[in-house]
Amino acid sequence: MENSEAYYKKMTETPVSKLIVVLGIPTTISMLITSIYNLADTYFVGTLGESAQGATGILFTLQCIIQALAFMLGHGSGTFVAKCLAEKDAKQATKYVSTAFFVGAVAGTILMAFGLIFLSPFMRLLGSTETILPYAKDYGLWVLISCPFMVCSLILNNNLRYEGKALYAMIGLGAGGLLNIFMDYIFIEHMYLGVFGAGMSTAISQIISFFILIFFYLKMAQSTISIKAMSRDITDYWNIIRVGFPSFIRQGLTSISNGVLNNLAKPFGDAAIAAISVINRFSSFIMCVGLGIGQGFQPVASFNYQAQEYTRVKKGLVFTLGFSAVLVGLLSLFGICMPTVIIRIFQKEQTVVDIGKIGLRIASIGVLFLPLSVSVNMLYQSIRKAGIASFLALLRSGLVFIPVLVLFSFLWKLDGILWAQPVSDFLSGMISLPFIFYFLFKTPNTEKKEEPEEL
């Protein structure tokens, strides 16, 4: 286990670009593996027909709800864990991570119970048609059963990253993802369990991933997890929620907007929902690169900002913007240049292919602007500027996307629905630019050792 002095030196003296890559690449790999197993679900379920595949789009919305809760608690506590470790106070760090972990376990259990009791109306609310509903219930049953484990896994994963242990976070999530792909193949192709089997493989992999991550956290982290360490001060709970709230907005609005998207696509049939499901899964795969590098930047920004190493934070922001833009751009080329091939991998129905190939190409262009909005949003969250971070988090999935989606669907029907997200990505990126420039030019350099002014 790394002691506090060695960790402080690593975080404040290692070249920023190297540090972000060291922390960001494992995170990116773990997110890509998670995205790949979502694509695997989409692929294997796609062999069962377009209605079954539509169910994966419905459950993508539910998974966003779970992630919203987990990321709020994980990023909120992780930011304070990094702050405490910069101050060489492992006991305080333990208090924050323990509080988030047990709150997440309770909240995940409540969400599981609510979802299971109201399973059918819940799936309809998320956009399920009557033909998709049986498949959505089969899949959703297992996703909800695994909900407490999924929430706690993501809290552990995020706090491992903020402790500089991104490799262990990658192993925990990656092992679950690879296991899910293998079980999808066994349960669907050989045991003929259909969508029920796909959901069961997701639940089993999430539970196993949780136990791997809890083992790593207890063995490798400077802080630890103990129910006795939970805070008795309501201010600590508020601080975790306040700083983590941008993540809740980011993921929660993704869930809401996907629900709106599915409901607006309903009149165009199961083929439209299935096509949008494939587009969203592939776009999420590309987004993982930008998010992964951004999450590698978060602990660097949080720790160095607390240590008043402001110049390192600036350099980290510029590097993160450039590096993630290059990687996202390279992956986007596949969606831009060969959308038909990609759609056909997941669904052979010609109607789905016809809708999906158009949507995938323009969606792949839209994600090119994601590094602008994602990087600066994660920056302000990591330096505990919760108000600015919350506003930036509102943009892509809510403040911009939902009005554009409703307007475009009214004006141009299905074509408008397909164009809404790329246009929102572009607008969100442009709105984020002034916040990038403000931080770079208004934040004092390290040698001044003073807090920069608030926006």
Image (tube, rainbow, N blue to C red):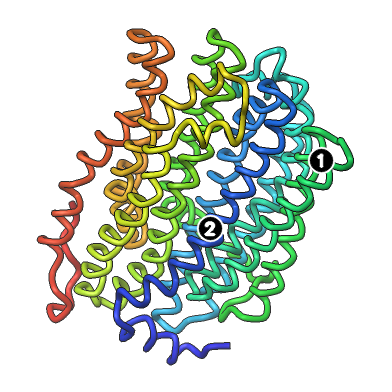
Give the farthest residue toward the right: 191
How far across and down, in percent of the image, does residue 132 sit? Answer: 70, 19
Q: Amino acid at mark 1?
A: Glu
Number of the front mark, 2 or 1: 1
Q: Which residue is mark 1?
A: 189
Left or right: 188 as drawn, with respect to 225: right
Q: Residue at the location (72% across, 14% down)?
A: 131
Q: Mark 2 or 1 closer to N-term? A: 2
Q: Nearer the viewer, residue 272 or 296?
A: 272
Q: Amino acid at mark 2?
A: Gly
- Quarter of the image holding residue 111? top right
- Residue ID at (12%, 78%): 448
Return the residue nearer the eye: 96 or 270.
270
**204 over 364 or under it: above or below:** below
Give x and y (percent) for residue 165: 53, 75
Separation (CA) of disc 2 from disc 1:
36 Å
- Asked if 362 appears above or below 89 in the picture, the reply is above
Give above or below for 48 relative to 85: above
Kindly identify the residue that appears in the image at 48 percent across and 41 percent down. 251
Residue where numbered disc 2 is placed? 74
Percent of width and height locating residue 9: 37, 89
